[in-house]
DNA sequence: AGTCACGTCGTTTTT
DNA sequence: CGACGTGACT
């Protein structure tokens, strides 16, 4: 009995393929990681490949770590020599060694998105480009796409000749790139692109790595962009014992799970693999081991609506399982409440621990309602994404100190902290220094060192010199062997008074910040203890720059996980709640209104497919009729993707109508019984022409009344959902409420409330209370009522049937 | 120089 | 709604 016996025939074929290019089309849950790890074991054990010559590339550290662990388990001796790493850290490692040939310093800084934004702002200011006319992001994304395609500033300029707008971008690109270099910094895209440049210009380096990495494996291949493909194309080139060229490249991917087109992922990489490598072996893994039949069939039905895909169909031997459920709630609050409560019930009654659950949504902003409910119901949870630890102000400040010490050329870092904490160095001073540095072609920090030569600084000069000497003192200490990174951090916190300032501040957020700083120190210590190579400042900064939030996810901790669909790729959970299934949210309005909607909606559909296929046992889809977004109320109808799931796979649940009234606030306000919507057997149950679909007929009513005064009215008729702000939709009359087919808003009597601030009112559940505040929120009033012992509640006047009590 | 109030605007997704 | 930038004011 060997470890390979447990593989199915296709998996086994993939595992036993040793030489030459191979494309593995691995459907969701088809055991691709298993194949990859077994193949590595097979190469080492059966084909005598030296582990040192195997490289596996992933996109996230988490995936890399998992693969490493699984390889370690099945490969005996030498597994630690296998190079398992992300694209980005691989490139950093290569560049740290060879980048000097490209004119950069070896301890370059890696710029994150915030740094990029700061730099581009400087560039635009310098080139006197009005950011009101063209937004920074336009330039940044143009530059990023260029880099994803491997287009240099010079090439870009050539292609831009004669095109005014493109020339403008070209100039920005050139200046941006020039400044990156002066700052001795690389952005994320540069990491890949500069590595390719290095290989193209330095055959010695290229041959070294070609010779070293004779077996290359790429995970999530559908997410690679053009420049990443170029990179692996360059690397996967070795000579065998007969002096013949071999491309021992094994890529694993699923075109149906390609969800990063916005980041430059090029689906052609997977679709054209066989053109690029005519001798490629193609293997399809179509047996799914993860999900029930019902879940898998639902996913298959949805993805089947996409045209641009390789035809395949996943199947499973698993049991049918329960049906997919769908429920449309009245509000996002109700949705969150029900989802969290049902998780709590499953935990309470069936003893299912919290780490079996995932709540998935399209956008990070949607996490908030869930978080509130989780706290309220004391359900342990972890949110992936939203605010990354390393994006917090205090952390960025301290990292900027570290960067300043590590790479004095990084002007962005120096400018960030030169006046943090306050040193009385103001904008005018900085401008003078900047001017001086440009004139003398030196870095910003070097200009600071020559502050006494800069005209017009006045009293600021001494402040600058004391800052510089502080940095220099620390730098000199760093060269001592006994001075650890932790010491360094503490020295900064002490010497700058950063910590003291926070300790003296008595607002609550200061406490959190101190906590975060301690967390940062922990991370530094962990790095120093666990580093495989001698710990260095650059090494730490690099690790920090390349972490993704998903990397912190630990499967065994007992909490519910909340994250976006994008973050969920590659993960699996027994119970999945896919929330916010509404047209305009998912698929997003951006995709619906794109110039090429068909294409963009296909990407959304793939995302939906990814979401459904995360589930092992149960999947619950849900939507809300009404949702708060960016301070305005949106009315959305159920996602078109719901319609794509055949009725026989779906259980439509009616939102539970627990009594008529809110339990707390308007979040649990009367939930309209949804069942009339779902009496039809047809697939098109949510089509707008369906007379039973109350939500969309409601929308249509709103359109007619509100369109003239609405924001963004262009193309409104093609929009499936309505979103308007109370203030912009002010034009319509409250009587609209009377014409509505639903009763929710029947009481939405703007201007005709029977009570006011100070009045005593009666609530069916909470009893008597006093109205303490009344504000226009959405399309009716938000009423704050003090119910004494029951607490102070906020509710919408239309939902909470409040009766005035005459006293 | 630093603070505060007001106005604007909105990345869907992230290595 | 809330984060962030701008500009006026202290």
Image: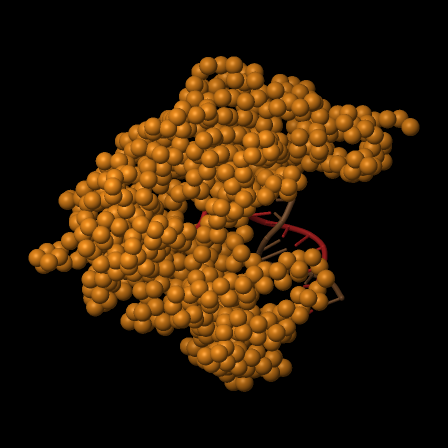
Chain colours: A orange, B red, C brown
In front: A428, or A407?
Answer: A407
Residue at the far front in the pictured view: A1
Could you tell me if residue A562 is visible in this image? no
Examine the rendered structure and indicate whether residue A660 appears above or below residue A274: above
Is A439 left or right of A227, judged from the image as shown? right
Residue at the far left in the pictured view: A242
Horizontal and vertical percent position of residue A326: 51, 26
Q: Quadrant of the C terminus of chain A?
A: top right
Horizontal and vertical percent position of residue A732: 65, 28
Q: Quadrant of the N terminus of chain A?
A: top left
Q: Residue sitting at 10 percent across and 58 percent down? A: A241
Could you tell me if residue A382 is visible in this image? yes
Number of numbered tags placed on the structure image: 0
Horizontal and vertical percent position of residue A492: 57, 73
Examine the rendered structure and indicate whether residue A713 appears above or below residue C10: above
In front: A514, or A229?
Answer: A514
Is A120 left or right of A634, judged from the image as shown? left
Q: Residue sitting at 73 percent across and 36 percent down? A: A794
Horizontal and vertical percent position of residue A726: 65, 35
């Amino acid at each position: 009995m060997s470890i390979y016996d447990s593989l199915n025939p296709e998996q086994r074929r993939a595992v036993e393929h040793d030489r030459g290019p191979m494309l593995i089309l691995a459907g969701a849950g088809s055991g691709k990681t298993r194949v990859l790890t077994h193949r590595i074991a097979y190469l080492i054990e059966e084909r005598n490949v030296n582990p040192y010559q195997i490289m596996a590339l992933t996109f996230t550290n988490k995936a890399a770590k998992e693969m490493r662990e699984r390889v370690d388990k099945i490969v005996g001796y030498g597994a630690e020599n296998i190079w398992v790493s992300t694209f980005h850290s691989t490139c950093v490692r290569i560049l740290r060694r060879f980048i000097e040939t490209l004119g950069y310093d070896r301890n370059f800084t890696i710029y994150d998105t915030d740094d990029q934004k700061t730099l581009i702002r400087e560039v635009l200011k310098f080139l006197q480009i009005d950011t009101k006319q063209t937004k920074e992001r336009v330039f940044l994304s143009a530059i990023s796409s260029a880099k994803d395609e491997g287009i240099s500033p010079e090439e870009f300029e050539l292609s831009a000749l004669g095109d005014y707008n493109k020339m403008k971008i070209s100039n920005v690109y050139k200046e941006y790139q020039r400044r990156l270099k002066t700052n001795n910094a690389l952005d994320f895209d540069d990491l890949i692109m500069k590595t390719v440049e290095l290989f193209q210009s330095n055959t010695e380096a290229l041959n070294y790595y070609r010779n070293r990495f004779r077996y290359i494996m790429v995970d999530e291949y559908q997410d690679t962009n053009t420049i990443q493909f170029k990179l692996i194309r360059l690397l996967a080139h070795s000579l065998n014992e007969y002096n013949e060229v071999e491309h021992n490249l094994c890529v694993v991917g699923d075109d149906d799970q390609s969800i990063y087109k916005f980041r430059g992922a090029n689906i052609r990489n997977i679709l054209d693999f066989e053109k690029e490598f005519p001798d490629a072996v193609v293997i399809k893994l179509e047996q799914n081991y993860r999900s029930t039949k019902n879940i898998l069939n639902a996913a298959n039905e949805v993805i089947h609506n996409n045209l641009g895909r390789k035809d395949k169909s996943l199947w499973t031997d698993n049991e049918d399982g329960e049906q997919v459920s769908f429920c449309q709630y009245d509000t996002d609050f109700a949705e969150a409440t029900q989802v969290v409560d049902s998780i709590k019930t499953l935990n309470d009654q069936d003893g299912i621990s919290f780490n079996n659950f995932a709540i998935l949504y399209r956008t990070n902003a949607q996490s908030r309602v869930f978080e509130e409910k989780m706290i309220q119901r004391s359900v342990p949870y972890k949110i992936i994404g939203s605010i990354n630890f390393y994006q917090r102000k205090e952390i960025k400040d301290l990292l900027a100190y570290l960067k300043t010490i590590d790479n004095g050329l990084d002007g962005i870092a120096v400018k960030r902290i030169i006046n943090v904490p306050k040193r009385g160095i103001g904008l005018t001073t900085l401008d003078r220094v900047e001017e001086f540095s440009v004139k003398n072609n030196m870095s910003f920090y070097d200009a600071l060192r020559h502050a006494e030569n800069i005209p017009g600084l006045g009293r600021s000069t001494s402040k600058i010199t004391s800052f510089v000497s502080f940095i220099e003192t620390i730098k000199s200490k760093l060269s001592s062997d006994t001075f650890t990174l932790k010491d360094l951090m503490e020295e900064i916190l002490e010497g700058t008074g950063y910590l003291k300032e926070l300790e003296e501040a008595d607002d609550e957020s200061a406490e959190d910040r101190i906590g975060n700083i301690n967390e940062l120190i922990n991370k530094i210590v962990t790095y120093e203890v666990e580093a495989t190579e001698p710990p260095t400042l650059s090494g730490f900064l690099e690790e920090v720059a390349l972490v993704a939030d998903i990397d912190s996810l630990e499967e065994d901790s007992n909490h519910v996980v909340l994250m976006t669909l994008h973050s969920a790729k590659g993960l699996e959970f027994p119970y999945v709640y896919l929330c916010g299934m509404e047209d305009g949210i998912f698929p997003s309005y951006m995709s619906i209104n794109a110039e090429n909607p068909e294409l963009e909606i296909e990407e959304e559909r793939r995302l939906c497919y990814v979401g459904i296929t995360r589930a092992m046992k149960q999947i619950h889809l849900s939507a809300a009729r009404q949702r708060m977004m960016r301070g305005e109320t949106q009315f959305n109808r159920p996602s078109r993707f719901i319609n794509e799931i055949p009725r026989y796979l779906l259980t439509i649940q009616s939102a539970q109508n627990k009594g008529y009234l809110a339990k707390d606030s308007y979040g649990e306000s009367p939930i309209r019984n949804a069942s009339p919507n779902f009496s039809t057997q047809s697939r098109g149950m949510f089509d707008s022409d369906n007379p039973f679909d109350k939500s969309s007929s409601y929308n249509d009513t709103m359109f007619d009344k509100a369109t003239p005064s609405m924001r963004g009215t262009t193309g409104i008729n093609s929009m499936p959902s309505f979103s308007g702000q109370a203030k912009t939709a002010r034009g319509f009359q409250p009587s609209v409420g009377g014409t509505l087919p639903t009763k929710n808003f029947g009481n939405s009597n703007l201007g005709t409330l029977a009570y006011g601030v100070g009045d005593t009112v009666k609530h069916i559940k909470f009893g008597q209370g006093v109205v303490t505040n009344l504000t226009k929120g959405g399309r009716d009033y938000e009423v704050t009522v003090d119910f004494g012992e029951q607490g102070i509640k906020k509710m919408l006047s239309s939902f909470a049937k409040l009766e005035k009590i005459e006293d």
